[in-house]
Amino acid sequence: MSLTINTTINGKSVSGSAEASTSLLEFLRDTLEYKGTKLCCNTGECGACTIIYNGKPINSCVTMAADANGAQITTIEGLADGDKLHPVQQAFIDTGAVQCGYCTPGYIISVKALLDRTTQPTPDDIEEAVSGNICRCTGYTKIVDAIQLAADKMAGRS
Amino acid sequence: MAKAEYTVLGTSIPRQGGVERVIGAGIYGIDLALKDELHGGILRSQYAHAKIVSIDTSEAKKVPGVHAVVTAADAPDVRYGRTYIDRYMLAKNKVRYMGDPVAAVAADSPAIVKQALKKIKVVYEPLPVVIDQEEAMKPDAPTLHEDMPLPKNLPEGVKVKNVCSYTPVHVGDPDKAMAEADVVVDEVYETKMIHPQYLEPRIAAAQVEPDGRITVWANAQAPFGVRTDVARLLGVPLNKVRVLSTELGGGFGGKASGITSGAAIEPICALLAVKAKRPVMIVLDKAEETISTTIRSGAKMYIKTGVKKDGTIVARQGKVVYDAGAYSGFGAMAGARCTNMLGGWYLMPNCHIDGYVVYTNKQVCGPVRGPGGPQAAFAVESHMDSIAAKLGMDPVEFRLKNTPKPGDKIIGVPKLRDVSLGETIKTAAEKVGWGKVKLEKNQGIGLATGSWIESAGPGGGAVVKVNEDGSVTVHIGKIDMGTAPRFGIPLIAAEELGVPVNDVTVVNVDTDASPWDAGTVGSRAIIVSGTATKLAAIDARNQIFKMAASQLEASPDDLEIKDKQIRVKGTPSKSVPLATIATNAHNIIGEVIGRGYCDNVAMMAEEKARGSSQPFTAHACIVEVDTNTGNVKILKYVAVHDIGFPIHPVAVEGQIEGATAMSIGQALCEQVVFDNNGRTMNPSFVDYLMPTINMMPRIETTLVHGYPGAGPYGAKGAGEIACVPPMAAIANAIYNATGVRITKLPLSPENVLRALKEAGKA
């Protein structure tokens, strides 16, 4: 049975139809063509599909499309202001935290959700915020640098 | 060479392609969508070893929405492989591991594909299964490849079976030297299979064009290898196949299909597209990838070393039994490398090591990041600490005692030009606080070293085009997966052509237009494509100078380019814009097209003549062992490397940090686990543990003032070497903390606790 889903993505009202069994990730990528949210493990383990759902970062691959009805969703496509990148996006580029870049959209979303809460994260805050985001390229060292740089920029410290 | 001599080389200008990656643009293979495309899926063997009695696809073909069902009977009777041509793209007569492709379907939706795959009736006759590579060598083991002869170089009288390749490393007279040694240490080490687990799933898409040519899209590290396999396996000439590379979400050797007997999804997809007469795309599920695609093999390593009382190593004897998996794949190359490296990279006057690469009923060995090296280094560098302990010598002092000097030989390298091994050891010891840092209870300090191959592999080319506005387009045959192609390569073209880095574009691989290349593999991107791009840019510059010389009334030798202006050296007022010359070229030579290549035969001959400057490394760490749970926490980690001249230092650090993390994963948690029937017990990310940020220390990277390597401007490859030392560095720190030597990976809580209990330490 097809469902009609009315939702808000990056501040814009959108609607589309999905099966009851469709995941939110499939709905975003395949129906609405928001391809910035990436498919990887499809079991909620790697964080590549992270989006912000009603203010909280979630794995969209293990969330049903039906749950998007009436929700406020932010995807990676909603972060930049025209050509001006969000400070987290810019920090990932500036620190060399983007190698293959496949985990990057989900990572940036998780970090944005953290820095929206606090621009003075402790190392434990950072670890907790991105413990669900696997990166296979960087060994995490430059990602931690990017998070710190973005926090400093957003707090006006640098 | 120092950075000061250059304008942009040696700086860390942000990678090209960064913006599209942070905004979530749909650039990867998985983001592709072809008009009217069908979904493809593969039926995989549910037996690790069986005869195929029959395959009936009639019911599957009747499912509404199915457009093609293919088996081996639909393809030419052609096999593929790298060492041996031993594998069909779709299994014929036999399956040899659980995951071997048997049939494939193209249909309107993924759900219909699944339904149709279930309706394919395959009758199997199960055969005995062999999982362990040593068991596979025994006379009563089942035979995997009835039609494959044993290696021709096997010594007379060696009674083995299922051996895919044999590597002898025989130097001097180790029997005599061993008999004269004061101390002999004899150990056995073992590593397990790990999967590279790049995050982006593998995809293939294919369509037949109106003129009959086949276009294939692949997120593969070796697009030309894909072209070769698609053409061979479908029986069409190379000029009828075009492979377009998408952006890659990680590879680490796992996506180097085409050259390695990979998963063959590209030719299977192309076959489906031909049969269905519609575009087809296959996306592998992550669990499907873990069981079916190429992996880093496990190795069992016997290592025995004789030393004098003063710490001088006099002899080594050993044996490597390396798991090829079900087909030859990359096994022979990786196993040979492992065998050579078991001889170490210290002075070793006498050595006798036999390396056997053996078929088993598991998935196939691929060229995963530093193939063969990390396994050998786990044994060699753990063993070095065991010897030092028996001698009562400090492990750092013992290593320095046996460090080669310029002009010395090490196993596999006839003559060394420079040796930074000692320098990396001393720097790592200093950075970690060796002998100085105060360790608490259950804390330990460990160090391990490594080396990697320099200048061995195929050549490759570059084409550098200077457009009429003075911007530059670079074509190379290597893809970008976060490595040199869009970090260091643009800097090289910018440096040689005097243009801003942002005016250089390195385009992705299109086999119709790009120069042939073996792919982004083997730490070769900066060596091959860097050398070729440098020479191509110089060739383009010479063409520009020739045209500008008449206009400026000067000799081409007196010209230079800076800031997109061609100037007479010493007379900056005499200049002409690069754009003017590049535009004028339309009336003369058409376009400024520079061609360059990395001539690997010449490079290797030069290295042989002048001696090799290997990349060396030393890693050191401090760990804390929880003796109640067996958990190992890394408190500090330093990685010291000589990679010659770092063309893009942040890119080099990124490679080192990433490769270190991958081996920390293999050290502490990663392994593909099998049951006795050959079934993978942990195919999904839920069960296959790999490092998250929680278990990773900050990796403190130091690049020592490097000796020039064989690459452009004295660069050395940096993609793999950092995978070599971590496992032994951590094992040595655990030994230092607990006095317990663990010889089998992974050093997981379960295994560490068991070892501690057996030693009465927990």
Image (cartoon, coloured by chain):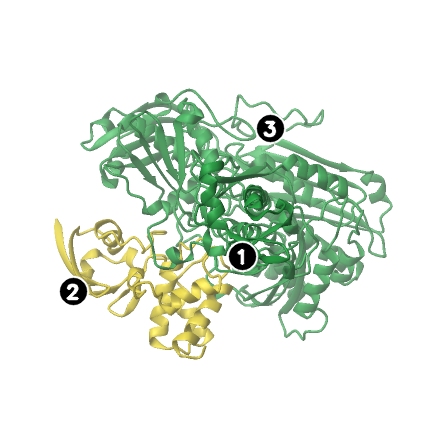
Chain colours: A yellow, B green
Q: Which residue is mark 3?
A: B161
Q: Is residue B421 visible?
A: yes
Q: Is residue A18 above or below residue B592?
A: below
Residue B471 placement (x, y as % from top left): 45, 50
Q: Tell me residue B269's x, y (percent).
A: 35, 33
Return the x and y of residue B689 as percentages of the image width and height. 45, 55
Residue type pointed to by label 2: Gly
B156 relative to B636, above or below: above
Q: CA distance from mark 1 to mark 3?
A: 45 Å
- Distance from disc 2 to disc 1, alpha carbons, whole Å, reads 43 Å
* Residue ID for mark 2: A70
| Residue carrying label 1 | B651
- Dot 1: what SS? helix
Q: Residue at x 66, y 54 (%)?
A: B644
Is the residue marked by circle 3 packed among few (<14), some (14-19), or many (20+) residues within 10 Å? Answer: many
Q: Are marks 1 and 3 in contact (CB under 8 Å)?
A: no
Specify few, some or many for label 1: CA neighbours under 10 Å numbering under 14, 14-19, or 20 or more: many
